[in-house]
Amino acid sequence: MKRFAELTEQEILALAITNEEEDSRIYRGFAEGLREKYPASAKVFDEMAEEEVRHRTMLFELYRSKFGEYLPLIRRQDVKGFIQKKALWLARPLGLDEVRKYAEAMEFETARFYRKAALTARDSSIRQLLDDLAEIEDEHENLAHKLGEQILTTDARANEDETSRRMFVLQYVQPGLAGLMDGSVSTLAPLFAAAFATHNTWETFLVGMAASVGAGISMAFAEALSDDGSLTGRGAPVVRGAVCGVMTAIGGLGHTLPYLIPNFWTATVVAFAVVAIELAAISYIRHRFMDTPFLAATFQVVVGGVLVFAAGILIGSS
């Protein structure tokens, strides 16, 4: 790799041309990734890609007038300290907010890099060229805002925000809620059965830990293997599985940890309180994200929880 200060004026201009071409293809990738669910934002990135092509043409005409037809292949990864971008445009599905922030950061960081390099350049022509490139990148950032105002009307943005909310619910809330419900409810019976059978807080804690961790692992694999997300749009199965598994374990550990308290009845009362909080949290999440009436959600969750809870106590006390 070469240091930026070692590049000739020809190489700097060639690097700028390559950079403009690469950015254009990145924006095309964003547009294609967003087109199905966010058509208005996809159109914004189509326009930005076209603008990058026009800037590349302008830079290449300047290059050709000074250095001829040969354009050396020099890319950002060939220059030490140049901005390295993760391949977000290859991910599917694309997150709308993440893509918008990525594009803004891409233009801002490139402009900042050019300006910083201009301060260290000794040759006046190179310094002027870097300043000009920084101004072009600033224009790109302003263009993104301008195009967004023209294409992303209030209605279009509202529709895309609603789509983004639904995707968030599908990819994170649903698997997380399923895990929290399973972990909170399914571990009640073995935990309280062990508690009332032994009246030993440490043994009860071990049973609760085993039930919580085991349920978390089971739910993680079940969620990940149930749907690869290609048709439902529910996102990467590994992410969904991890979310579901972690929330399952958390749901069980919530009422298991109180049994670290040595006194049995104190630990049990605290565990009862934690169970009530868990069921209330599940009811709120169902109401907030799943559009379930709060009273109906509370009734459904509480009835199921109480039945499992009672079963555990009865079995443990027999």
Image (cartoon, helix red, strand yellow):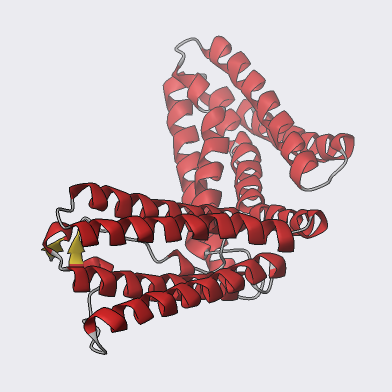
Q: Is residue 305 above or below residue 33?
A: above
Q: Nearer the viewer, residue 285 or 65?
A: 65
Visible in this render: residue 206? yes
**Can the viewer see residue 218 in this picture?**
no
The answer to which of 229 and 264 lies nearer the viewer is: 229
Question: Image point 19% across, 64% down: which residue?
Answer: 79
Looking at the figure, which quarter contains the C terminus? Answer: top right
Please name the residue shown 62% across and 23% down the image: 274
Is residue 20 toward the left or the right of residue 103 in the image? left
> Where does residue 190 sit, x and y in percent of width and height?
57, 37
Q: Nearer the viewer, residue 317 or 126?
A: 126
Q: Residue at x 56, y 64 (%)?
A: 94
Q: Where 290 sits versus 224, above or below?
A: above
Q: How many marks can you see?
A: 0
Q: Residue 245 appears at what percent x and percent y? A: 51, 49
Measuring from the top left, give residue 47's x and y in whole percent: 60, 72
Q: Quadrant of the N terminus?
A: bottom left
Task: Name the one closer to the observer, 217 or 281.
Answer: 281
Residue 184's place in the image compared with 138, above or below, is above
Q: Residue 74: x, y in percent? A: 22, 75
- Quadrant housing residue 171: bottom right
Residue depicted at 23% across the width and 62% down the height: 125
